[in-house]
């Protein structure tokens, strides 16, 4: 990576990310897009390369304002990483690309992901005991994972990581998720697939109890206590925390099969980013 500018203690670094075939299983309206979970791994690896002693397991103030389309013909894609430290020692990082006007004379930076890696702070998130998490109150329905990925979250095989039936009630969603098997990095933040599947669970809940198909646009905090691994199975509980007409806020917890908490996510924000172009199928709605 090459440093290309420094403004207000921010450094920008050009790099190319490798586009593995499995990434093309993550798409929206016919276009492959970089998953939010993959952008977090890219940013975490960059932070560790410049600050080897940094803690990358407490992520906060994340936002995903724009999709990053993946070039289907390319094996690599150019991006720009912006990294800075604040007065408290926390490390801010953003994933950017250069966007050119149609005349090709004017260019600007488009932000696709931002996250703060908190340092020297108490990064604790409360979680209910495993015996309480594995029970879902309220009137439940069970949605088979095959139905989810055929009709509700139509991604390719690599991103079909809700397994079995998903239980859904007004109190949340509960189900088993997989660490995946594709060629992903699970050494940096853990496997990207369990957190990605947790967001699928929140999407299913949103389609049942609201009139929108919600997509993740950020989260308040994500604490990684134990890195998830590819090939492993996990139990995930998603809880609706603050539900408005166009904005859905969830908390989520990911446990291993021994009841040990792996990840806690606070204030996962989901919205309709399609301006109503996508609507839930009639059969899923209450």
Image: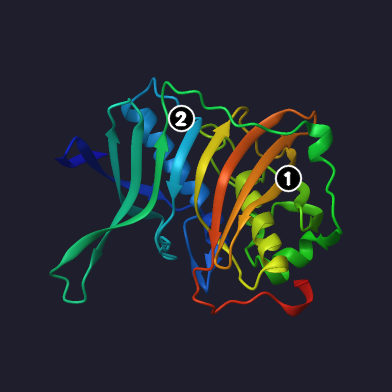
Query: Residue 44 location in percent, x, y?
Result: 43, 36
Query: Residue 157 location in percent, x, y?
Result: 66, 59
Q: Which picture quadrant has residue 233?
A: top right
Q: How is the image coloured?
A: rainbow
Comparing 242 with 148, the one in front is 242
Q: Secondary structure at mark 2?
A: loop
Residue density around tag 2, few if under 14, some if 14–19, many if 20 or more, within 10 Å: many
Identify the residue at horizontal 78%, vertical 49% (top origin).
175
Identify the residue at horizontal 47%, vertical 62% (top origin).
33
Please determine whether, in this image, residue 85 is positioned above or below residue 273. Answer: above
Query: Residue 105 location in percent, x, y?
Result: 12, 69
Residue density around tag 1, few if under 14, some if 14–19, many if 20 or more, within 10 Å: many
Please determine whether, in this image, residue 75 is positioned above or below residue 124. Answer: below
Identify the image quadrant of the N terminus: top left
| Nearer the camera: disc 2 or disc 1 | 1
Comparing 190 with 245, the one in front is 245
> Quick check: 230 left or right of 66?
right
Q: Secondary structure at mark 1?
A: strand
Which mark is on residue 229? none
Q: Which residue is mark 1?
A: 237
Identify the residue at horizontal 52%, vertical 74% (top origin).
29
Distance of label 2 from label 1 (alpha carbons): 23 Å
Q: Earlier in the sequence, mark 2 or mark 1?
A: 2
> Quick check: 205 left or right of 193?
right
> Quick check: 152 left or right of 107?
right
Query: Residue 25 location in percent, x, y?
Result: 58, 61
> Quick check: 265 left or right of 285?
left
Identify the image quadrant of the C terminus: bottom right
Q: Which residue is mark 2?
A: 56
Comparing 274 with 171, the one in front is 171
Identify the residue at horizontal 49%, vertical 47% (top origin).
38
């Amino acid at each position: 990576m090459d440093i290309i500018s420094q403004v207000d203690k921010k450094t920008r670094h050009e790099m190319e990310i490798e586009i593995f075939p499995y990434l093309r299983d993550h798409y929206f309206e016919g276009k492959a897009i970089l998953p939010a979970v993959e952008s977090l791994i890219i940013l975490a690896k960059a932070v560790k390369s410049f600050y080897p002693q940094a803690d990358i397991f407490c992520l906060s103030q994340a936002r995903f304002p724009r999709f990053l389309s993946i070039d289907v013909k390319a094996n690599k894609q150019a991006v720009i990483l912006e990294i800075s430290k604040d007065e408290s020692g926390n490390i801010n990082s953003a994933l950017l690309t250069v966007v050119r006007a149609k005349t090709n004379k004017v260019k600007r930076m488009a932000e696709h992901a931002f996250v703060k890696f908190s340092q020297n702070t108490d990064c604790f998130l409360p979680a209910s005991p495993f015996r309480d998490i594995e029970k879902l109150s309220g009137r439940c329905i069970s949605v088979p994972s095959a139905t989810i990925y055929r009709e509700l979250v139509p991604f390719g095989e690599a991103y079909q990581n809700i397994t079995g039936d998903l239980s859904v009630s007004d109190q949340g969603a509960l189900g088993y998720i997989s660490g995946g098997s594709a060629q992903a990095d699970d050494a940096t933040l853990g496997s990207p697939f369990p957190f990605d599947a947790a967001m699928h669970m929140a999407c299913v809940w949103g389609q049942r109890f609201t009139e929108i198909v919600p997509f993740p646009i950020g989260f308040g905090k994500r604490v990684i206590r134990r890195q998830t691994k590819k090939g492993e199975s996990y139990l995930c509980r998603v809880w609706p925390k603050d539900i408005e007409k166009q904005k859905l806020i969830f908390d989520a917890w990911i446990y291993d099969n021994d009841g040990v908490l792996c990840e806690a996510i606070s204030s996962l924000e989901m919205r309709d980013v399609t301006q109503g172009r996508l609507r839930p199928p009639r059969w899923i709605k209450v």
